[in-house]
Amino acid sequence: MRPRAGVLIAAGALVAGTVTVLPATATATAATEPAARPAAPLAWKDCPTKAYPKLQCATLKVPLDHARPAGRSITLALTRVAHTAETSQGPLLVNPGGPGGSGRGMAGYVAAALPRKVAAQYDVIGFDPRGVGRSEPALNCLPGHFDPVRPDSVPRGSDNERTGVERARAFAKACGDKYADVLPYIDTVSTARDMDAIRAALGAPRISYLGYSYGTYLGSVYARLFPERVRRMALDSVVNPHGVWYEDNLAQDYAFDTRHKDFAAWVARNDDAYRLGTDPAAVEAAWYAMREELRAKPASGKVGPGELEDTFLPGGYYNGYWPELAAAFSTYVNERDGAPLVKAYEDFAAADTAAENGYSVYASVQCRDAAWPRDWNVWRKDNWDAHAKAPFSTWNNAWYNAPCAFWPVDSLTPPDVTNDRLPPVLVLQATDDAATPYEGGVALHRMLRGSSLVVEEGGGNHGVTLAGNPCMDEHLATYLSTGKVPRGADGSEADAVCDSLPEPEPGPAKAKTTATRGTAPDAGATLHGMLGHVR
């Protein structure tokens, strides 16, 4: 699972760390938790932005190691849009995914995108998870790791492969050298316990939660640890808990390849605009020919094959990016001009300091959360097998996750998130989502007794609520307002089905816009610019 580089910059296993896994029939409760420090009231201060004038900020100290609450502390950065209704429904924590995604901006977006009547009932709380953004310490293992031009992601011979392996090993070593005292505590369970510390600091007996992408797994783990502290929980674009994390990444390789073919088919349907032919297979072949040319001569010395994959990968998350990507593709092929391609790379994929921080946390969480193969021969076989059927991003994804083969901290055993102690949970999923394939939503729905599955039929975007689909948004708003979930007929997997949004029209992309209400035509671009995309 991988976040898009421009937003931040994923398991069958051979080696496991030593950790006590939660039994399938038991759940940690307040009675079994270590004694926590008394929660000091949060000191909220106004920190308005142009888009979110009512935003407030605060910080919270939490234990680095929750098993030693009196030991070293770290700091979480929080944001809030306070409720304005006479009666409050309490806090609504929000998370954009990743792992490694900054959640501070999500509070303002969610409060603005929900219907006013619903948003007014909640204190919408965003937070940068441990290690991320303005939380302290913020990780950056190896600055410049994604500087262009990287080696071609598809290894051509043993020397190329050895170069990739050594890059991954160097990144893992840099993390261990720089953050040896912190890495054992950068993981999903620790972040879930941070969420409960936020709850306590807010003085709330229970929280509501809206999580996207990796945030669905974080929410599921929180619910497993603290079921009695969950009031409402909406999980949008669901990580498959059965594949954390190695198998989930391999599953994504196939799904992203399919989505890339969808993009090629859309370009072919819009041949009048892009002049790349009306045959989807020919369009796809032209993309791979472009990739080969960039291997020999990167565009402006910035965009080689790996950067090209990074640039087009966001189109697998959100089809609103397709017009800009297609225009850059067309201009390169038809006019031999790489400038729009470089601009698209800078818009969607270039890694800045925030991206380096996001990737450092991404690797730290995923490599610690679950066991990964430590024998590189396993990676080689699995990824060549996947590449043979799904060449678009398989090896790019493999190198992104490869530090986990050499991670300096032992892996944990993921908790079983099966749960029969929750109020109804709302699960929201698109059928053609590439980042978190549909099977994950179905799997979690089955694992959470009493949950309700709302499906966007034919939708391929990642993140399906507060992104411009009125039907999906109505289900979310009704749930947050009343706690009611739809119930389907017996034997039906989905409890409710919404039509997907129309595919984009050719023309200028709206990738960098300001959030308004969820019905705004650019709502999808705004949301997807914030999500910590998982790959």
Image: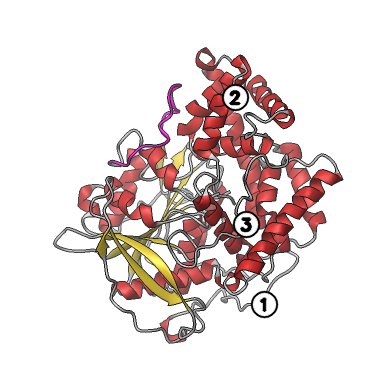
Horizontal and vertical percent position of residue 130? 48, 66
On residue 142, the disc is 3
Of the two numbered discs 1 and 3 in the rendering, the one whose residue sits closer to the viewer: 3
**Labels 2 and 3 touching (C-beta < 8 A):** no
Disc 1 element: loop
On residue 338, the disc is 2
Considering depth in this image, is 305 or 269 the residue closer to the camera? 305
- Magenta segment: does it hold 156? no
Considering depth in this image, is 57 or 411 the residue closer to the camera? 57
Q: Residue at x 53, y 66 (%)?
A: 188
Apparent side of residue 106 relative to residue 28 in the rendered image (left or right): left
For disc 1, the marked residue is 18
Is residue 58 among the parts visible in the rendering? Answer: yes
Apparent side of residue 31 relative to residue 484 in the rendered image (left or right): right
**Disc 3 residue type (three-letter):** Leu
Disc 3 element: loop
Tell me which numbered mark, 2 or 3, is placed earlier along the sequence. 3
Horizontal and vertical percent position of residue 300? 62, 29
Q: What residue occupies the far left of the structure in this picture?
A: 86
Tell me which numbered mark, 2 or 1, is placed earlier along the sequence. 1
Q: Tell me the magenta residue range.
A: 501-516
Q: Is 417 rendered above or below residue 68?
A: above
On residue 468, the disc is none
